[in-house]
Image: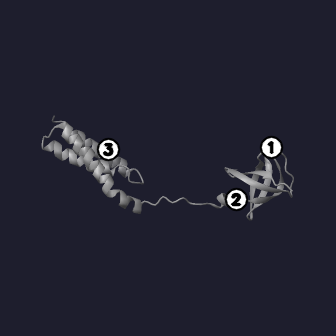
Amino acid sequence: MEYLPYLWLVLIALAVIVEATTAQLVSIWFVVGGIAALIGSLFSIPFAAQLTLYVIFTALALIASRPFVKRVIHTKKVETNADRCIGQTGLVTEEINNRLSAGQVKVLGNVWSAQSADGSVIPAGKNVRIREIQGVRLIVEPVAG
């Protein structure tokens, strides 16, 4: 099978292209496996053995590089001020009327657009509890009392 070295070269090239176009390590392990299989094909070993080399070396490269990748690639969640608003009590500064798409609430020192969770009109000066955030709008409910 004279075409097998070319098959492995194409696979290696595709993996390198994918790796070069992404910001994270996603296909470098396939390059290692492809090189092992390519070497096997140059020694004319059967295709099943080449495929076995490919799988084994890809898996070994993944296992060996995993600790390094976890240290290098940082995927930490960035908290925003918006997350802190949920569950807080705010003051309605402009009447909330969902039909008119009107209403503002001041919470934690910031003024947000707001809408009522149940569709009711909430007058200015009332306290509300923030249930959720949808886009840049707070979804609020009146506080009893």
Q: Is residue 19 left or right of residue 94?
A: left
Residue 14 shows which numbered tag? 3
Q: CA distance from mark 2 to mark 3?
A: 46 Å
Earlier residue among tags 1 and 3: 3
Crowd around label 1: few <14 · some 14–19 · many ≥20 (10 Å): few
Kind of residue at disc 2: Cys
Which residue is the site of mark 1?
119
**Residue 136 image offset from top left, x and y in percent:** 69, 52
Q: Is residue 67 left or right of residue 49?
A: right
Q: CA distance from mark 1 to mark 2?
A: 20 Å
The reply to whether the C-beta atoms of the residues labelled 1 and 3 are less than 8 Å apart is no
* Residue 137 visible here: no
Furthest-front residue in this view: 145
Q: Is residue 36 left or right of residue 144?
A: left
Corner quadrant of residue 23: bottom left
Q: Is residue 77 left or right of residue 128?
A: left
**Residue 108 image offset from top left, x and y in percent:** 73, 64
Nearer to me, 89 or 41 = 89
Which residue is the site of mark 2?
85
- State the SS at label 1: loop
Kind of residue at disc 3: Leu
Give the label, 2 or 3, closer to the camera: 2
Q: CA distance from mark 1 to mark 3?
A: 54 Å
Give the label, 1 or 3, closer to the camera: 1
